[in-house]
Amino acid sequence: MTTRFEPARPRPAAAVLAAAAAAVAAALLLAPAAAGAQIVEARRGMVSAQEPHAARAGLEVLEAGGSAVDAAVATAFALAVTHPQAGNIGGGGFLIVRPPAGPPAAYDFREAAPAAASAEMFLVDGEYDAARHHDSHVAVGVPGTVAGLHLAWSEQGRLPWRRLLEPAIALARDGFAVPAHLARSLAGVLPAMRRYPASLAQFSRDGAPYAAGETLRQPDLARTLERIAATGPDGFYRGPTAELIAREMQANGGLITTADLAAYRAVRREPVRGAYRGHEIISMPPPSSGGTVLIEMLNVLEGFDLAAGGHGTARTVHLMAETMRRAYADRALHLGDPDFNPALPLPRLLSKAYAARLRQSIDPERASRSSPASFAWPPAGEETTHLSVVDAERLAVALTYTLEQRYGSKIVVPGAGFLLNNEMGDFNPAPGLTTAAGLIGTPPNLAAPGKRMLSSMTPTIVARDGRLRLLTGSPGGRTIINTVLHTIVNVVDFGMDADAAVNAPRFHHQWLPDRLVHERGGLEAATRARLAAQGHALAERERQGVVQAIVYDAEADRLAGAPDRRAPGSTVLGY
Ligand code: GLY
């Protein structure tokens, strides 16, 4: 593909994306501070997570003398019980840790393709089969979460492993009151779970949806967590849990075997690092595209005076959208699992010189046009979840993990009580299968045995003058990287506090389809008109992402966070 951007003609603001679940008042999006700032400040430690029991589990670990890694592990295991939409032990993710002194680290516990995988595995009689790719036992990747949490803990934890699982075990065994938003979500997913008796049994009362306030107990999950607490990763990757997973796979045409599970390893990697207006950016390297694309965008934006342009103005939105367009094109064309793509062009994509060339290609008055214009991405899961933790020593952890789609594959492992991911859907569908209907078949991200699928998860830590400044991350599929970009620009360029940085309106451009998608009520009418006149195809959606950010004021030695009001469970706790 040589020509990726062309000048565009003005277009009417028209398309409207399907509404997302939570309605967010336009007034709230346009004036987050006025809608009631909820800044939480603390001196010693802070946990920001998408569900209150899980945030509480992390805070109690900090109060008990645990490190930020300990608290992140406890929070993540608790989310696997209380936030089944994305919290998991049957999925995978990434963790960035920054110590107050010494090098940061990135932990990669992305799911891996089983040994029987191949680039053609989503074809049936030579035809691409979307259900096989996204909604089947074949769509399940070898889970990484338990191995990843254990690796991070074994290198940077302080409290006993078992202590970190205790809150999750209690929540699964004794149950918790189902909040209204989870009751709604479970009612919505039950039709898809009816195919799987163990899923229906776990997440309904004899087939009827849970009402808000009823107690959800998950005894099989409690027993699996007990095994993990007792023996570490072996409690998941070997013995009864592994056998239960392999049996479910074998009975339903899935590919994962006990050998695949025993072979899984989490990996410690070098984070990708960038510099933005005197700040150090530390983020996730491939197999996530997140950190690379984020730094590429920040490098481009560094050459524009965004603060002078103003937040949410047509000028700023245009420059950011054109930057997003270019970096997302590079994501699609170049990125994949580094262990299978030894020649990933990271030095070029992360360089200031390349960013300068991209910047020069941006016309400040006119939108480019992405090519091929008719391309549309396939649907991507947006139900990932992120958590951020800082402890009293200022060890900082940003962790994002996922099942891919909401409740992943919807398959609960019978007898083991946890949901499996459908992350194989993040691989490209088949060699060369790039179509106007929304498929992309570029080689770096084709399935292969043991390979990890490309991700957009972007757990990120920002430092300044050698001291912590910001932790951030979000769910949202391909929107994640832009959501994280917004948080950083909001703090660095626009001087926002934690509440404004998290709750300010967001927008997204991903090269293809060629659309600038903004949150409903997030851009003023005059701004929308100006952007349309410049040639942007505008679309709107209810919400973009759910940020869990912590802002650190090194001078005052104070931590600040604020719940993202887009998601009812978002919780920030400090002490
Ligand atoms: N499954 C979403 C992501 O990894 O980006």
Image (tube, rainbow, N blue to C red):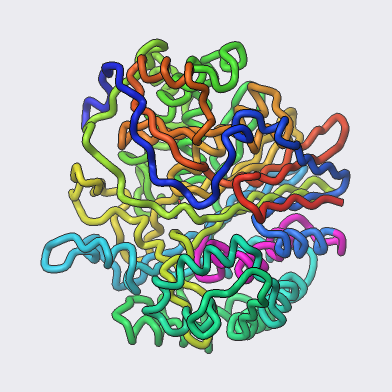
Where residue 271 appears, x then y in whole percent? 56, 44
Where residue 515 appears, x then y in whole percent? 35, 32
Can you tell which quarter of the image residue 484 is in? top right
Q: Is residue 101 left or right of residue 185?
A: right
Q: Is residue 535 left or right of residue 172?
A: left
Determine whether 125 is above or below 234 in the image: above
Where residue 250 appears, x then y in whole percent? 34, 85
Q: Is residue 73 magenta?
A: yes
Residue at the spot x=58%, y=80% of the render?
234
Name the outermost residue toward the left: 125
Residue at the spot x=51%, y=59% of the render?
402
From the image, which quarter does the N terminus lie in? Answer: top left
Magenta-highlighted residues:
63-92
Determine whether 70 is above or below 499 in the image: below
Can you tell which quarter of the image residue 363 is in? top left
Determine whether 470 is above or below 49 in the image: above
Residue at the spot x=53%, y=30% of the render?
522
So how many labels did they put on this image?
Answer: 0
The front one of 111 and 316 is 316
Determine whether 301 is above or below 114 in the image: above
Residue at the spot x=41%, y=75% of the render?
260
Q: Is residue 124 magenta?
A: no
Where residue 175 appears, x then y in whole percent? 69, 78
- Residue 543 in view, yes or no: yes
- Residue 348 in view, yes or no: no
